[in-house]
Amino acid sequence: VAPPGPPAHAAPTVPAGVPAPPPGSVPPPAPAPQGAPFTPPGGPFTPPPGAAAPPGGPFTPPPGVPAFPGQAPAFGGGAVLAPVPPEAGLRAVLTKYAEAPVGDRWTEQNPQLVRATLTKGANVLAKQGSMVAYQGDIDFAHKGSGLLGKLTGQLTGQGMSLMRCSGDGEVFLADEASRLFVIRLQGEQLYTSARGVLAFDEGLETEVRRIEGAGLPGGGLFSMLFSGTGAVVVKTRGIPVVLPVGPATYVDGNAVIAWSAGAQAVTTTSVRLRRSGYARQSSEAVNLQFRGAPGNFVVVQPFEV
């Protein structure tokens, strides 16, 4: 009986035609790199002789950033961000809208909002419904104009529905996001249109004046004259323009907001404007011609009331 031979799978299987490597000639597999930078086969890139080296030297990824897209950063690498409090974003957004510091009696909070600082005995008259916020002990009351005032307002178109703001505190005023401008008078006079006034100091004197002119029904238009010491808050639709009064300054009667007392305003009509710029209107266009010494001005808004 023949002795048993070696097991069939004791020796490695070698494909036909390929000689088996001698024992001990195959190196053991290298351990996997742990966080080591990737080295391409053949070693790092070296420019050929005579070629310029790349600017900045060989590429080295910043700390915490993978060397190649899709490669996860090494454990423990990268900067650790500090925790952000939840209210930091809210504070950063609303800080620029904080209440403006108190200046004088009138403060422009922003182009569409003014603040009046009230004290005892110094009241403010404002358009009804213009209060958007207030702080302190403030009282609001309707300011009646009497029968004569109502009749004058109806006949001249310069009537105003006002409320008296009194007390000790602060009142914020606005009107449909219109642009607001605080004009301070120091014993001076200012002509305005009633529809362009938001508020004013009660100590100012008001008077309805007639603008003379020819060729108009009734012989003229009307305006309000403010005089004394105090402030008038004027509102405009859009950003206005302040024009110096020259020898021939004409303004649309529906766009004028205010003008200096030294400027003489006279109503006039223009057939040329009626035929070209106002072709769809049946009535003639009413313009105001301003004349006066140098230094006078007129305020015009980019909107026709």
Image: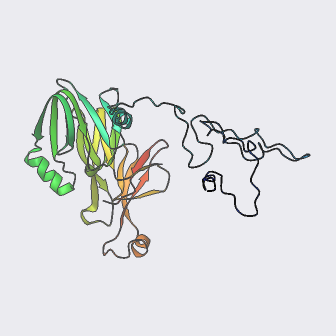
Q: Could one spot residue 187 in this view of the protein?
A: no
Q: How is the image coloured?
A: rainbow
Q: Residue furthest front?
A: 1
Q: Residue furthest left?
A: 147
Taking the spot 39% from the left edge, 34% from the top edge, the residue there is 92
Q: In which quadrant will I find the N terminus?
A: bottom right
Left or right? Give the position of 290 relative to 20: left
Residue at left offset 32%, top offset 74%: 281
Q: Is residue 281 above or below residue 205?
A: below
Image location (x, y in percent) of residue 62: 62, 36
Q: Nearer the viewer, residue 272 or 167?
A: 167
Find residue 299 and report its horizontal and vertical position in percent. Answer: 40, 49
Residue 241 versus residue 215 in the image, above or below: above
Q: Residue 37, percent across and down?
A: 66, 38
Please report the residue visible at 25 percent of the width from the left and 49 percent of the height from the top: 194
Answer with left or right where residue 260 lies relative to residue 79: left
Q: Which of the pair 142/117 is nearer the observer?
A: 117
Q: Residue at x 40, y 43 (%)?
A: 262
From the top left corner, tell me how far across and down residue 15 is, in percent.
Answer: 70, 61
Residue 58 lies in quadrant: top right
User: Relative to residue 286, is residue 250 drawn left or right?
Assistant: right
Quadrant of the rendered image containing residue 65: top right
Instruction: Using residue 27 as the reference point, say whether residue 133 is left or right of it.
Output: left
